[in-house]
Image (cartoon, rainbow, N blue to C red):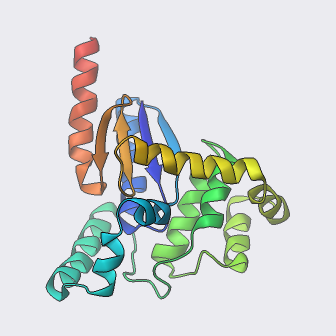
Amino acid sequence: MIEFFFDCSSPWTYLAFHNIQPLAKELGEPISWRPILVGGIFNSINPSVYASREKPVVPKARYMKKDLEDWARSAGLAIKFPPTVFPVNSVKVMRGCIWLGNDAMVPFATAAFEAYWGDDKDISQDAVLEEICAKVGIDPAEFFKGIGDQAVKNQLKANTDEVMARGGFGSPTIFINKTDMYFGNDRLPLIREALQRAKAGAA
């Protein structure tokens, strides 16, 4: 079992979300999609992220942009970094993922990732969310009603608290078989090896 804790506001998560799906399909592993609010993590346990944005190391920031573009090219994805609105408030998108449930959230999250990172649209805006809903066949009125449900809000907070309690400090945080944690898109080769070892051990 792969658990994928994610927030659509993260560029590395955009890449990992795309890349982990064919890997999981190839190895026959189900994915439990776990929406979180990465800003809540940064506020609680990883405030250095904000400090690095306020006083960026210019060569490192320049390389990060190149690195993202290289990884996106490898994945066949379009990416604009930084987008016009960055960071973005992703709470409505992530509540939408909770409301939709594990399988139905995938096309919605995909469209949200592409709207923000590929098309440079502000996914905090209701008009953009309406476009995303229309693209994937969701009734916008039902969507906005659903994300206002207190149980949905509570679950998003619970997921965020859970990943921190389990040692996570950002997005994407990926667990294999509950305890084996990996962070970031570039760890997918290690995830592949871990899954293959597990399968070999079970054989």
Residue 26 screen position, x and y as percent = 36, 35
Q: Is residue 8 above or below residue 165?
A: below
Q: Image quadrant of residue 130?
A: bottom right
Q: Give the quadrant of the N terminus.
A: top left
Looking at this view, name the residue that lies furthest to the front.
44
What x and y, as percent, mark residue 191?
26, 40
Residue at figure coordinates x 83%, y 58% from the top left: 142
Q: Tell me what residue is drawn at x 28 percent, y 21 percent.
A: 199
Residue name at image x 37 percent, y 58 percent = 170
> In which quadrant of the rendered view does residue 81 lie?
bottom left
**Pick the front one: 95 or 46:** 46
Residue 64 in sight: yes
* Residue 105 picture location, percent across and down: 62, 50
Q: Image height check: is 117 above or below 157?
A: below
Instruction: Give the camera-side residue of 5 and 188.
Output: 5
Viewer-proximal residue among 179 and 93? 179
Residue at point 33% right, 31% down?
179
Report the residue that reaches farthest toward the top: 203
Does 114 sit above or below residue 178? below
Residue 74 location, x and y as percent? 27, 63
Residue 21 can be seen in this image: no
